[in-house]
Image: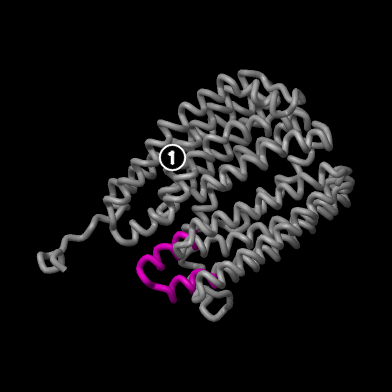
Amino acid sequence: MANTAGIGMSAFAQLLSVPILLGAWGAEKYGIWIMLTTIPMYFALTDLGFVQVATSEMTMKVAKGERDAALGVFQSTTALIASICAAAVALLIGIAAAVAAMGYVTVTQNMQLIVLLCFFSAFTLLSRLPLGALRATGHYALGTLVYDFLVLLEGLAALLTAHAGGDFSAVALCLLGMRTVNMAVLNMLLSRQVTWLRYGLAQARIREIRRLFKPAIAGMVIPVALATSLHGAVLVVGAIVSPAAVAVYSAVRTCSRLMIQVVGVVNRATMPEVAKAFASSENRSLGAILSMNGLLIGAVLLPGTLLFAAFGKEFVELWSRGSLSPSRTFVSLMALATLVHGAWYFLSNMLLATNSHVSLAKYILGASAITLLLAVVLGGSIGLNGAAIAVISGELLCLAATTVAFLSRYREGGWRRRPRHDSADRKY
């Protein structure tokens, strides 16, 4: 139910964003905004997958009653992420300044915006730490509701700023201020709900970071794949087609992925439960969770994407008040991409929940690179439809790789069997 509320709040903000920003800035400026705000998307990759891996690890430690070990994971990850954020902000600002000095007008004109977005990205990354800690310690619903509500307020404040006449920098400054509030509230909530899980360096260990390094790097591949096939395609469309085409692509992509959000209501909520069942060798619970997620794909995602393929064009036109009119072919292609994505992303989350995803890394990364190359080639020749075909190709490769990795892990005993006990143990 917490995820349902979160999905509803996210969908509400997304549905409002297109007509409000189009009305405030027009299609071309809106397309430029979408391109510039890919900075936070790529910045999110700088945690190298440690936040998700640490959350899964803490969940399994807490399930076993190992609080000191969970605290060590939390403090070690916090120290690493804070250091990475500081270095990444300095690096990105330095690169932007160098590019501006080379005479790129777009970068020069938007330097202030880029700096604000860099800091916003860093704060967004840091805010995931208390959220992950709440989810790992049995407060998934509370943490999710508070976080998603604060993100909704953040988005509404930004839209109100744009509607009132604010430019890109004003909207970015608003986002940064609201994210600061988000972090403060989440950390206060964590300190009250989980008194033993505290910030500091006393339990931080280099060896803990080294131990988590391999699954963290592998876990980073999934957001890299998403960023390449989705947000990378935004940059390709903007560079090869036009900024106005970015507005069409972004709107259709947002609508097409609403069904992913619906399935994610259960899928994301089951991740800590998968970790707990895995740590406790509860195979029956694991089987039930897998069956439930599979049923949702067949009963919700499949019919949802079919409906979008049939009526998505009209919905986007109505949503944008006639400003955007995608072709029916493009809408259908994006619907197919969503269906394939939902299937492999569900399986990858099951692996990610137990840090059993290392073998996926090279295959998902290769699929991402192929997607971007195809987007450049096909986008230049057949426009938006070409970009959509590129995304579908990448999603199919990801599906194949994830299916093989999941089945291999299952057959090799990756999901632990419940150990045999003697009669005394069973009686006890």
Quadrant into which the C terminus falls: bottom left
- Judged left or right of residue 285, residue 328 is right
Give the residue displayed 10% in from the left and 65% down from the top.
423
Give whichever of 36, 381 is nearer the camera: 36
Spot occupied by residue 186 in the image (x, y as percentages of width and height):
61, 64
Amino acid tagged 1: Ala
What residue is disc 1 on? 401
Q: How is colour applied across the structure in the image?
A: one colour
- Judged left or right of residue 354, residue 185 is right
Give the residue displayed 87% in from the left and 43% down from the top.
165
Q: What is the secondary structure assignment of the residue under circle 1?
A: helix
Give the residue displayed 44% in from the left and 42% down from the top.
346
Spot occupied by residue 216 in the image (x, y as percentages of width and height):
51, 58
Assign the magenta stretch its main secondary structure: helix
Q: Is residue 210 above or below residue 355?
A: below
Magenta extent: 53-76
The residue positioned farthest toward the bottom in the image shown:
202
| Quarter occupied by residue 123 | bottom right
Give whichever of 233, 133 is nearer the camera: 133
Spot occupied by residue 381 in the image (x, y as percentages of width and height):
69, 22
- Judged left or right of residue 408, residue 158 is right
Spot occupied by residue 153 in the image (x, y as percentages of width and height):
69, 51
Q: Is 62 contained in the magenta span? A: yes
